[in-house]
Image (tube, rainbow, N blue to C red):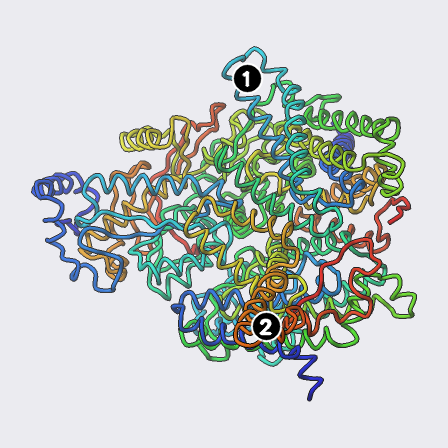
Amino acid sequence: MSWFSEFGAILAMQGFNGLSVFCVLLLMALGLAIIFGQMGVINMAHGEFLTIGAYTTYLFSSLTTSYAPAFAPYYFFFAIAGAFLIAFCVGYLVEWGLIRHLYRRPLDTLLATWGLSLVMQQAFRSTFGAKEVSATLPDWLMGSVKPSESIDIPINGLFVMGLTVILTGMLALLLYRSQWGLRVRATTQNRIMSGAVGINTRRVDRITFALGCGIAGIAGAAFTTIGSTGPTSGSLYIVDTFLTVVLGGAASLAGTIASAFTIAQTQATAEFFMHGSMAKVLTLSAVVLILMMRPQGLFSIKVRR
Amino acid sequence: MKTIYRNVLGGKAGTLDVLVLAAILFAVFPFALDPFRLSLLGKYLCYAFVAVGLVLCWGYGGILSLGQGVFFGLGGYCMAMYLKLEASDPVSTKIQSTPGIPDFMDWNQITSLPWFWEPFKSLPLTVIAVLLVPALLAFIIGVAMFKRRVKDVYFSIVTQAIALILSVLIIGQQGMTGGVNGITDLKTLHGWDIRSDSAKYILYYASGVLLIAGILFGRFLIASKVGKLLLAMRDKEERVRFSGYDVANFKVFVFVVAALFAAVGGALFTLQVGFMSPSFVGIVPSIEMVIFAAVGGRMSLIGAVYGTLLVNFGKTYFSETFPSLWLYFMGGLFILVVMLFPNGIAGLMDSHVRPWLARRRGARLRNAETPADAPPVDSSLPGTATVRSPSPLAPGEGASTPRVQPAH
Amino acid sequence: MPIDESSRIKNSRRREVLRVIAALPLLALPLSALAQQFPTTKVNTTKLAVTDGEVTVGQLHSATGTMAISETGSIQAERLAIDQINATGGVLGRKIKIIQEDGASDWPTFAEKAKKLLVNDRVAAVFGCWTSASRKAVLPVFEKENGMLYYPTFYEGLEQSKNVIYTGQEATQQIIAGLDWIAKQKNAKTFFLIGSDYIWPRTSNKIARKHIENVLKGKVVGEEYYPLGTTQFGSLINKIKLQKPDVVYAIVVGGSNVAFYKQLKAAGVTSDKQTLLTISVTEDEMLGIGGENVEGFYAAMKYFQALDNPNNKKFVEAFKAKYGEKSVIGDVTQAAYLGPWLWKAAVEKAGSFDIDKIAAASPGIELKIAPEGYVKIHDNHHLWSKTRIGVAQKDGQFKVVYESGLIEPNPFPKGYQ
């Protein structure tokens, strides 16, 4: 086997790695992006909604292993659905109890949701204990496929990728091809006019927020295949998430996709040529620089304020 | 003289507020608290510098920086570098393979002092660096961002990213910065032992005096034309721009001022706590400092001090009494303050306590004299009647977003 | 307390018998009588929180924040030890009372709370800290206020203090024996060093590199650091695949740990194809990672829950009885358990609670009830201990495959700096 073909294999795997980082970023950011787009609100507790999804998966996993071991290979799909439902409901409640009072003060929402994230972290700690837990994942998820002798493609990476594509597609359909999407886009462009023509903007807000949280729940469930489940696990992802959303610009699904792609490729490439820490610094600096060039993000639509 | 009285001290009510704060800081606390609690208080006062700076740049300038920890940390690191060099004289570090350099450098096989440590051998240069380094960084960030009209949430997230960049950098370059452990075991400032009880008292008083000086400077700024423009800009940026002002310059200015406040706080913090670590540079402390300002009242320089003290005492008290529940209290407090009291403690004072006091006084007057002569309650309100709104455009006027009212 | 100070290890059995005989009359005495034998005025000359019936100690760990994941085990183990000591008569006839403080994963808070414990509460000893950063933050406080800290974590060394007893291993103890073993077993020549980006992994890898290059005559083919909290290791894994090292030497910690091993497994880097030696995965971490994801990898520690000796059986039983059948015990948890026992032994040897006397009495103290077997405090306040190699099992436990002799602690190793 020549060095050359081996190098090719590494190149292929590194390419796949870039793609999978891209999908992880996009999946984390999707939920936050639609909330930010719709309401201009950054939800600092987004990471904790990811954690809700992760803990839901853990619950499903322990229930399955104790009551229905035969069901183990399939429970993961139900866990994802459960994660969505629970995160959706919590998000709905949070919107009702907290966010709707702060719509006119987006910067204040940052602070209030930060407080919320502290409370939620402590709630996880009281409920599940301070130590990390681990959901037993189905065996089929944790292997790798081998298209050739020296290439390994992780199945969990493929799974996250598939999930991201499906979710993004569904979200795009929902936003651009449904009644609800029409209302969302109308509200984003001109809230007052939308109210005047009979759209219940309050309701649109609430569903959007809950939906964003629900998607975070799904992401959290999916991330149990690649990361940890603990009270503060969600906070590992948040800064990357914020940057992806902000770089993408408000109210633009395409922007979020483009920004996740930019960040992921920068990071994956940099990581291959230098230390992880320096690669991180480089990536973050690149994002700051791009934001300087394009203050409203990569893509932004005209919004009447 | 009169303008100074009005602009710097804020008239009768403002003077009273400053005097009350000074009395609490210099007379009540040192006698009511034991040396240990007092040294904690000294530490909180350092955070208060950051909070006061945030009132200027967030409350008045409308710029929410989630990266003030960067400037706090830089100020603190500059000071810590000087102290560390003093603590690493060749005699006390003679067991090292290279005596005379900080211990962590020796552990990392660094055999000579890196160039950027050289200036910190001198105290005057250190003091200059404490102010200049953070100010310069704030200036660069400010120019880069505000000239390009990066604002609102975008700016907040960018500052957050910068905080992360700096903390990753400091941790990654541990040979030159001390890494995640920070710069520890600091002992003397120009031969003066900063760990003794008397030093703690002196540093505490010094912080208090500097803080009050800072507040007065802040008041002067707010009452000046710059302050008025800032408020105007915050509420209707486009109108100010169309009036011919370069909005970005004012934003850069106030951002640099806030950074300077943070840097001074950081340097004093290093002196009082005896170490500096990257955990002050990151995202979490930066957000906490914003919370201090929010609890105190984002439009009130003095309120920021009270807010800082209250949150930190609460944190210490709750975590001592309920070690595993205190995050509920803290989280709950933040949510509550933001939702119900957007003007913080200062807002509560102005909307509830002062009218109540005035009513009581009014009632007393009425009882003592003829009721008909009693002054109307509202006009006798101290505080609200004096320097209420320095803005030429009344805050909230025409704005689609109801703005928080200035108080002080 | 009649403790035979001049005893040697080889005389230990005779000494044990003597000690039991000597202790017999004590058992017959009521508690108060023992306390009277050591009047408070005599055993406490520095105004510590010691009364006739009680002695107060502090516990300083993170119950909240990111480090709570790791430090919970230490909190539990220290409490267990103190309960056991109280149940068997306390220290010099005095019951131990605990004041627990939360360091909240925040170093200045650690310093603040340490000062509170020492200055306000006047505690007789503090069991606490976990990360190096928290220890570095409290160290000046302990030295200035003259307190005693029992520090449980394996750490990078390069430190020694009169006011600290290090109950975990310092870097050379943990690293060198493990590397020697793996080099011999696997005939390993090339190593890939990986760490989270902070002082312990960096210093440990430095020692590892020196040992690999100078002693084992091997080669380090890569050395990589990722920020704490990194969740994406795809690029790193590809680099490992490109280099094909004989051994991957991993010191990844915290939430990154889980991500690293899960992604490693998913990328097909499993123990049948790649030898991996870690010094940062204990049974506690296995809970989060999941045994199936690290199965077959090696860990070098001084303690594993699976150790087969009577002390350990009793310890594991007591721990599970107190904290539930599902709880696991990692290396640091066991080291934390040693703290209160070592302190008790030092107090009894010194016949006093005074910090200076305890510090002076500590070197030479032996502990035979230690779950890890036998430990002894060195003059440099670290412990003599053995290093074991464990193979990770699917059920989250380790199978012990190698045990070294007793290794001398050497926090300032010559030739490794």
Q: What chain letter is assigned to the residue under label 1?
A: A
Q: How packed is label 1: few (under 14 Cα within 10 Å), some, or many (20 or more)?
A: some
Task: Identify the amino acid type marked 2.
Answer: Pro
Q: CB under 8 Å between callouts 2 and 1?
A: no
Quadrant of the snapshot with the N terminus of chain A: top right
In the rendered view, does A73 fall on the left or right side of A211?
Answer: left
Q: What secondary structure is found at the residue carrying circle 2?
A: helix
Identify whether B147 is placed above or below A100: below
Tell me the chain of label 2.
B
Against C396, residue B71 (above or below) is: below
**Residue A83 visible, this angle:** yes
**Coordinates of residue A297 in the picture (x, y in percent):** 83, 48
Using the image, tell me which numbered label, if any, was put on residue A64: 1
Q: In the picture provided, is A102 more to the left or to the right than C61?
A: right
Same chain for mark 2 and mark 1? The answer is no
- According to the picture, the residue beneath numbered tag 2 turns out to be B371
